[in-house]
Image (cartoon, rainbow, N blue to C red):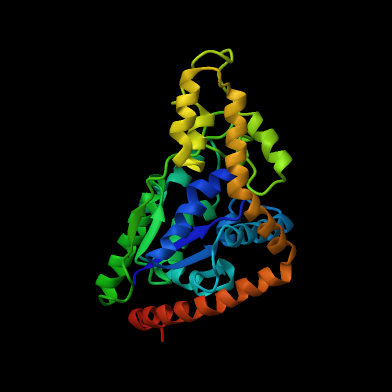
Amino acid sequence: MKTSLTGIKPTNNPHLGNYLGAIRPALALARSYRTLYFIADYHALTTVRDPALLRQYTRDVTAAWIASGLDPAQTLLYRQSDVREVFELAWVLSCLLATGQLERGHAYKAALDRGEAPSAGVFNYPVLMAADILLYDAHVVPVGEDQRQHIELTRDVAKRLNHLYGEGTLVVPEALVDDAPLVPGTDGEKMSKSRGNALPLFAPASELRKAVMRIATSSEPLEAPKEPEGSVVYRLYRQVAPARADEMATKLRAGGYGWGHAKQDLFEALEAELGPKRERYQAIRADEAGLEATLAAGAERARAIAAATMRRVRHAVGID
């Protein structure tokens, strides 16, 4: 069975966009692949400067994935920083990559375009990401189209190391491009915590309903027909309750069914999906010792894989 690897950066509390766009599709891979998921806490240092928040987000994200259906007994779940070999491999890879490749990195270029002075961490981010992938012999890496560049760099440096030091030293991964639709926020733009347009994932039902009712809609009267395509409410409903999406579209086009009704139906669909998970999340999140034990157990398994990879790499490059 092939191995799939996914990294989760703990930079905020999870929201609905994370769940629909990343968590739910990634968990489905466990049916077809040997799956590894890691909490990318060192990657988060490029933006998170508060140590207490980083610890909180790490536990929030871990609890959210487990509550959503990740089974740590089946899927290897670990914290990036618990496996120090990743930094050793990152150094080896950095010695094989040209600075020009890193200068073309999306995040680095975007920071320059915004007039910022990006840190060396942002510049070297793709190297650490490549080490995250190659350390665990991953065959496929699920990514969005905007992340394909990172996988191409990872493939390039793996091939280069194999060519120089011996074929088979590293597994060359493939990108598994996710075709999941964009999850819109309350304003119609991509859902993002930083934009303030996100629907909370495990907030109380009353808070979730208030957020749903704030979704922007057009202002047709109740009796008027309404076009569902393009509306945020319908786009979200189609992702949350696809089997009932045609029914909502028919009611909207018929008239006599307002956006308030549609928002209420969306809330009820979300509550049916997330309500039971919210209860699990609250119980899991409250047990911080249990979360740490789960991550520690995963790290022990992850270190065994990482150590084997680094033995091959050290021997290949001449550092025994």
Residue 102 lies left or right of residue 44; in this view the side is: left
Number of marks drawn: 0
Residue 307 lies left or right of residue 290; in this view the side is: left
Could you tell me which residue is drawn at 66 percent across and 53 percent down? 278
Measured as percent of width and height from the top left, residue 306 is found at: 46, 77
Measured as percent of width and height from the top left, residue 52 is found at: 74, 58
Measured as percent of width and height from the top left, residue 125 is found at: 48, 56
Could you tell me which residue is drawn at 28 percent across and 76 percent down? 168
Q: Is 183 situated above or below 12? A: above
Q: Is 77 situated above or below 208? A: below
Could you tell me which residue is drawn at 66 percent across and 75 percent down? 293
Measured as percent of width and height from the top left, residue 39 is found at: 56, 62
Can residue 273 be seen in the rendering of this structure? Answer: yes
Q: Outermost residue, bottom direction?
A: 320
Q: Which of the image's four quarters has the C terminus? A: bottom left
Q: Nearer the viewer, residue 161 or 209?
A: 209
Can residue 198 be seen in the rendering of this structure? Answer: no
Q: Is 76 situated above or below 42? A: below
Q: Nearer the viewer, residue 104 or 303?
A: 303
Q: Which of the image's four quarters has the N terminus? A: bottom left
Residue 69 lies left or right of residue 161; in this view the side is: right
Q: Nearer the viewer, residue 95 or 19?
A: 19
Could you tell me which residue is drawn at 55 percent across and 18 percent down? 256
Q: Nearer the viewer, residue 69 or 308?
A: 69
